[in-house]
Image (spheres, grey):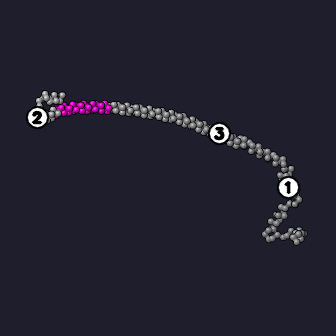
Amino acid sequence: MAMQTEDHTAAAGPMPAAPGHETAAVGAHEGATPAGEHAEGGLPQFDFSWWPGQIAWFLIIFFVVLAFMRLFAVPKVGGTIDAREGKIAGDIADARRMKDEADAQAQVAAAEAAQARAAAQRVGAEARAKAQAEIAARLAEEEAKLAATGAEAEARIAKAREAAMSNVAGIAADTAAAIVQKLTGKSATAAELAAAKG
């Protein structure tokens, strides 16, 4: 049915254009090309007659891009990479230098700590020895005082004993005289008391 309509339209010729569209229709018929002529051209990329121009433009653009890359882009990128590598190398050198300085400071601190520890031990030993000497001197002094006090006490005790013994002899003599007088009625003489004691 659609084919019959197309055949009928083709046989009848062009249809009259709607009012106001006559110029558009005329332009459309004038700009149309025969179907065979368009089909023969195809895509320019596959037409061998276009290839020399395409190759020439390709080479021109390629060498322009190559020159741009070689003169501008690659040196800039290479310079950036070199600068970055230099900065990294400098940072690594600084880090190693600071590590060496820190190690040296740690060794110095360890040596100072060892010296301080040895000094503290020496001072402690000296203080202990001094304290022990003072204690020994104080003990000797106290022992000497105790010995002197003991000797004085023993001397006083000996004197008291002698005094007591002399008093005992007198008391015994008096007691004996009193007993003799009581028993005999007459008092005994000193010679008789001495003879009785002897």
Q: Which residue is mark 3?
A: 85
Residue nearest the observer in this picture, 80 or 111: 111
Could you give the CA–CA distance between mark 3 and mark 2, rounded to whole angstroms? 143 Å
Residue 23, quarter of the rendered image: bottom right
66 shown above or below 129? below
For label 3, the SS is helix
* Between 178 and 130, the one nearer to me in the picture: 178
Kind of residue at badge 2:
Thr
The amino acid sitting under disc 3 is Glu
Indicate the position of residue 53 as horizontal and vertical percent values: 82, 48
Which residue reaches farthest bottom? 1
| SS type, badge 2 | helix
Per the picture, the main secondary structure of the magenta-coloured stretch is helix
- Name the residue that disc number 1 marks: 42
* Residue 138 occupies quadrant: top left
Of mark 3 and mark 2, the one earlier in the sequence is 3
Residue 150 sits inside the magenta stretch: yes
Q: Which residue is mark 2?
A: 184
Closer-to-camera residue (141/159) = 159
The magenta-colored residue range is: 142-171
